[in-house]
Image (cartoon, rainbow, N blue to C red):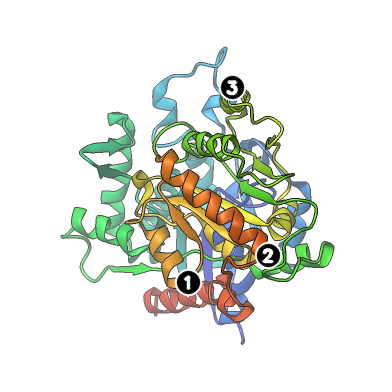
Amino acid sequence: MGVTKRVLLIAFHFPPLNSSSGLQRPLSLARYLPEEGWQPAVLTASVTAYESIDAGSAAGLPAGLRVVRAPALDAARHLAIRGWYPGWLGIPDRWSSWLLGAVPAGLGLIRRFRPDVIWSTYPLATAHRIGLALHRVTGVPWVADFRDPMVEQIDGEWFPGNARLRGARLRVERLVARHASAATFCTDSARRIYLNRHPARRAGQLAEVIANGFDPEPFAQAEAESPPRQAGVVAKQGLTLVHSGTLYPGPDRDPGAFLAALKAVRSRGALPPGLRVVLRATGFDKTYAPLIGSLDLTDVVELAPPVAYRAALREMLAADGLLLFQGHTSNPAVPAKVYEYLRARRPILALADGAGETAALLRRAGVGRILPIDDPARIGTGLGEFLQGLAAGTEPVLSPSGADEFSRVHRVAEFATLFTRVASP
């Protein structure tokens, strides 16, 4: 398809940032929009803004893609004194300084590139502040991609709990409701939260659900580097369960109940010989190492360091089972990791609230064993059954065609359709 329109993508998360999921949404747009008749350019942050980089990830960027980087300081790393920095420097996020350089850099890019649409994406609220400023100065239609809610109230408790941070995010959200041509979300729940909070949003503003997905290109590369086992085939040297990504104390991502259940299964002699549980890149190894030791699980549970994205995909493809942790406080969201798990076509043990969007997605797909994240007794029972199913090769996985339905290529086509609807004549 010939390129007829242009879009400016504003995204903090972009290569060479070493991230398993946060950058995949803008990266897939940069890769696949030209196939839908849209030429992208990217406004992102300076490489020094990133805590961890993967130098090889930039090699996957399309040839000729225009990428402009503006300085961004991380308040926690660049502006802290002995680990402390004023709280206002982290409002609405730790990289709020990105705005100062990104607006003039974006204006220069707009003059040269002449986009038909501006697109900005969370999870940094500063990206939307940049999109707003560029839209108001130039008049180019603006699409604000929220992905998940920036602010939620669950069981009477606000998230985030910090009132100043919450207020700043709500102000950004109100500005989106007043000025953006369209707002996009990853789930129906996230969309409903926004619509309920802003019933009098800009007249004619579109509010669309465009889900996450997996990027087929890095999966194809990962499979070429290490061909995966066939679906349903179990490794002979002992079962391996993998969780890839951040875990932390609290109701949302805490593996504590799972570890207690693992100990209970072992105590009753139901743990398969040679079982390995790999918790990759938790970000809180110092928190969980003592817990694992106190439960006498150090020979079973491995706290593994971060690796490059393709290496993480290879590990998913080689695992016997994949672990997911998501408490009820994240019910409106579906982590991008879930789509990667679906594409990996390995059995999934999901410790997730049954009323959330993730559980609903897994039920629609017909895969995954869903258990509550905070109930060791039920986890122990379900884990034992899951391990038996793995050994027998009976845990369900998607067919190749079923997995393809969750490809980001399809989601990029949905964005292209939306951009066409909001583009200037």
Say few, some or many: other residues with alpha carbon within 10 Å of mark 2 (under 14 / 14 to 19 / 20 or more).
few
Image x and y of residue 149, in percent: 34, 51
User: From the viewer's perspective, is residue 95 above or below residue 23?
Assistant: above
User: From the viewer's perspective, is residue 18 above or below residue 290?
Assistant: below
Q: Label 3 belongs to which residue?
A: 294
Image-quadrant location for residue 327: top left
Question: Is residue 171 toward the left or the right of residue 359 in the image?
Answer: left
Task: Decide which of 268, 86 is in the foreground and name it.
Answer: 268
Looking at the rendered structure, the kind of residue marked 2 is Leu
Looking at the rendered structure, the kind of residue marked 1 is Ala
Q: Earlier in the sequence, mark 3 or mark 2?
A: 2
Considering the numbered disc 3 on the image, is that residue within a helix, a strand or a loop?
A: helix
Which numbered disc, 1 or 3, marks the residue closer to the eye?
A: 3
Name the residue at 46% across, 65% down. Answer: 362
Say few, some or many: other residues with alpha carbon within 10 Å of mark 3 (under 14 / 14 to 19 / 20 or more).
few
Image x and y of residue 74, in percent: 55, 31
Considering the numbered disc 2 on the image, is that residue within a helix, a strand or a loop?
A: loop
Image x and y of residue 50, in percent: 63, 39
